[in-house]
Amino acid sequence: MLFIGSHVGFKKDTQLLGSLEEALSYGANTFMFYTGAPQNTNRYPIEDGLTLSALSKMREEHIDYSKVIVHAPYIVNLANDKDPSKFSFSVSFLQEELARCEQLGIQYLVLHPGSHVGLGVEQGISNIAKGLDMILGTHPVTILLETMAGKGTEIGSILEEIQAIMDLVSHKEYLGVCLDTCHLHDAGYDMSHFDDFLDQFDSLIGIDKIYCVHVNDSKNVLGAHKDRHENIGFGQIGFDSLTKIIYHPKLENVPKILETPYIDREKAPYRYEISMIRQKKFDPDLISKIKMEK
Ligand code: FE
Ligand code: FE
Ligand code: ZN
């Protein structure tokens, strides 16, 4: 079965119920959200009443809540221990984030591995593993390391780096991977040869460790290390390669999440992109149709 959705908002007053309603308005059957703003760590208390209303609505709508994902904010950086207070802030924030996930009944938290900011890849990897070991297993939540584009000093643009982190961590049962097609392409992995990529992934890490796929096209050429997402079919990866990934039999039950850009900064493209993906046919007029929407 295809599990397809997008990232959606999570607002103070509506919380999970608002996120669910936004996802349903896109024709999605799964979704991903940040428990607050992606770029900061201010978080409101979770209101269980809203969570319960959302859960009963999900039962009515036949949404499999086990496929719904939370994404940690970008600014958490476990790779950097130059400033010990920043490192311990990242650890304690993630600890609280795991607790929020548990309270919400969420099983998967996507995390950017981190940037080594000049400390070197090896030191960065050991810092990430150290930080993860301080929090994994304290809550029944699995952290998914996201594959990165390799912008700046980002760790995780090479599969061997993800593998190295996973090898060092003790609580491996609470660790998985989130693929991001734009990031993989920007890191230099050719998405038009996805079977070769999956074979490589399987031999290094194991396909069973993939619990989420971020499906994004890319504005930049293969290996650009830029990380600029594009709408589905309008970038350098293209509709056919992305559709093959979305419908790949080995990733059948893995949720696919769109993080493609808004049109004119205010119009979410997801209802259109999801419908195009379900029809398996590229619509070159998609963007202009969204622009015309009131
Ligand atoms: Fe991400
Ligand atoms: Fe992503
Ligand atoms: Zn990205």
Image (cartoon, rainbow, N blue to C red):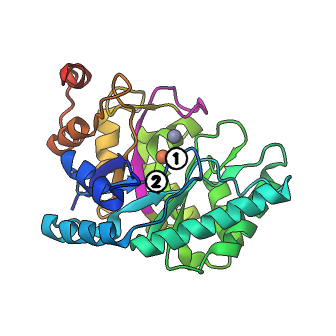
- Identify whether 264 is placed above or below 4: above
Residue 9 seen in render: yes
Q: Nearer the viewer, residue 133 or 166?
A: 133
14 left or right of 206? left
Name which residue lies at 51% across and 67% down.
206
120 left or right of 93? right
- Numbered marks: total: 2
Provide the residue span drawn in magenta. Answer: 211-227
Name the secondary structure under disc 2: loop
203 left or right of 105? right
Identified by mark 1, the residue type is Pro
Q: What's the distance in space between the residues labelled 1 and 2, CA to CA?
A: 6 Å
The answer to whether mark 1 and mark 2 are in CB contact below 8 A is yes
Rendered-image quadrant of the C terminus: top left
Residue 74 in the image: state x and y as whole percent: 59, 47
- Identify whether 131 is placed above or below 235: below
Name which residue lies at 36% across and 72% down.
48
Q: Which residue is mark 1?
A: 38
Residue 247 seen in render: no
Q: Which residue is mark 2?
A: 34
Identified by mark 2, the residue type is Tyr
Rendered-image quadrant of the N terminus: bottom left
Residue 58 in the image: state x and y as whole percent: 21, 66
Residue 152 in the image: state x and y as whole percent: 70, 36
Q: Is 225 inside the magenta-drawn segment? A: yes
Q: Is 148 inside the magenta-drawn segment? A: no
